[in-house]
Image (cartoon, grey):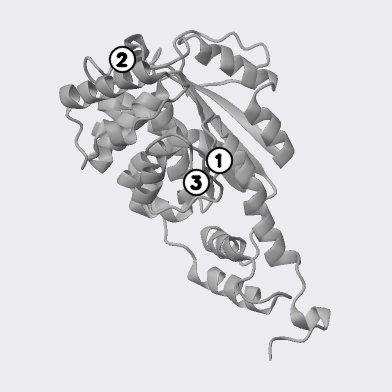
């Protein structure tokens, strides 16, 4: 399925299913509105899935990994080889996302979108969709070619559609890539037309000098590449990353197939901005898991018009916040379906 076709397939939320969910919420054994965001979320999920009783039993976290040429500028507290090492950790089940996904009853799908080195995957679980051996150094020129930007989005679309065809009810986005907060901050700056100082955070934990250097690098990348805020593909090409494009594709395909997609942290939100710039209707299918500790994340969510479910000072990525948000999303659907109505329970309604 090509990008243009996927965008055309995205439809508004189903009003009939939403109204049915609203009506049921009003007669459940509780004061109206007393479950707050859980009620809102259940109604939104009904609209996404066009089902008054949405089911989220089959949950998938798609973690996309890629390297970034800009790491040579010293923008990260960790060396670039950590990307491939962490991918192996994901495959072995030892990372935070593996632990939290197991708790949520979710599968973790790991995708190599462009790790700098070939990964020796003994498990056979790694999905290889390498667009290149990492991006180029955006501080010296475009991060990638336009055809690579398109290819990354296309790969994300295909992977999401494959998972959906296998029965996924809800998807979540995760990431791995040393240097990716630099790329994500640059994407956010370009699309929001904001200064690097207002958006850029410490990422993996750089010190004050490292933060100044990171801001300077992003400033230089934006000045050299001049990404066009009216052209999301141009922004991705000039200052993005292969995993950012891939995750944007996952979001677009989720929306086109009426599947909710849970957006994780800073990198996933940069991808969500690319997706929303390509197809504004995708916004209705996004659930913001949390607001990250990373500077600029709250501003990015506001730009998208998304209200996060959690605020836990997270800044790990990997899809960890999204895996935690799975519990709330599923809880909202269980309340809608399994809670008794006043009539069923023999409980007197409000006078």
**Is residue 169 among the parts visible in the rendering?**
yes
Q: Residue at x 46, y 15 (%)?
A: 115
Measured Cα–Cα span from mark 1 to mark 3? 10 Å
**Mark positioned earlier in the residue sequence (2 or 3):** 2
**Mark positioned earlier in the residue sequence (1 or 3):** 1
Residue 186 at what x, y percent from top left? Answer: 30, 30
Residue 202 at what x, y percent from top left? Answer: 42, 25
Q: Which residue is mark 1?
A: 172
Q: Residue at x 44, y 56 (%)?
A: 284
Q: Nearer the viewer, mark 2 or mark 3?
A: 2
Q: Nearer the viewer, residue 295 or 100?
A: 295
Residue 53 at what x, y percent from top left? Answer: 65, 64
Measured Cα–Cα span from mark 2 to mark 3? 29 Å
Q: Secondary structure at mark 3?
A: helix
Q: Nearer the viewer, residue 167 or 99?
A: 99
Q: Which residue is mark 2?
A: 136
In the image: residue 93, left or right of residue 11: right
87 up-or-down from 283: above or below: above
Q: Which mark is residue 108?
A: none
Q: Which residue is mark 3?
A: 254
């Amino acid at each position: 399925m090509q990008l243009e076709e996927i965008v055309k397939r995205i439809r508004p939320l189903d009003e009939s299913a939403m109204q049915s969910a609203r009506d049921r919420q009003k007669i459940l054994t509780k004061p109206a509105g007393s479950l707050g965001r859980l009620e809102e979320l259940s109604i939104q999920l009904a609209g996404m899935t066009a089902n008054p009783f949405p089911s989220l039993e089959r949950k998938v976290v798609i973690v996309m990994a890629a390297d970034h040429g800009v790491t040579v500028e010293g923008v990260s507290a960790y060396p670039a080889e950590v990307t491939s090492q962490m991918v192996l950790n994901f495959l072995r089940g030892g990372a935070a996302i593996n632990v939290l996904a197991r708790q949520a009853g979710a599968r973790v799908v790991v995708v190599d979108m462009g790790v700098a080195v070939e990964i020796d995957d003994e498990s056979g679980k790694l999905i290889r969709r390498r667009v290149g051996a990492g991006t180029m150094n955006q501080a010296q020129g475009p991060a990638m070619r336009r055809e690579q930007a398109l290819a990354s989005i296309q790969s994300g679309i295909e992977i999401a559609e494959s998972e959906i065809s296998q029965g996924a009810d809800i998807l979540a986005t995760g990431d791995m890539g040393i240097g990716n907060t630099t790329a994500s901050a640059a994407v956010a700056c370009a699309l929001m037309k904001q200064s690097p100082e207002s958006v850029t955070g410490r990422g993996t934990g750089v010190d004050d000098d490292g933060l100044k250097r990171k801001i300077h690098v992003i400033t230089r990348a934006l000045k050299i590449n001049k990404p066009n805020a009216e052209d999301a593909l141009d922004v991705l090409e000039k200052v993005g990353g292969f995993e950012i494009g891939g995750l944007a594709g996952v979001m677009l395909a989720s929306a086109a197939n009426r599947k909710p997609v849970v957006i994780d942290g800073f990198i996933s939100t940069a991808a969500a901005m690319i997706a929303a710039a390509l197809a504004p209707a995708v916004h209705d299918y996004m659930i913001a898991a949390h607001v990250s500790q990373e500077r600029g994340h709250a501003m990015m969510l506001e730009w998208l018009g998304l209200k996060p479910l959690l605020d836990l000072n997270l800044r790990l990525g990997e899809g960890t916040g999204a895996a935690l948000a799975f519990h709330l999303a599923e809880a909202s659907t269980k309340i809608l379906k399994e809670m008794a109505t006043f009539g069923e329970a023999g409980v007197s309604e409000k006078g």
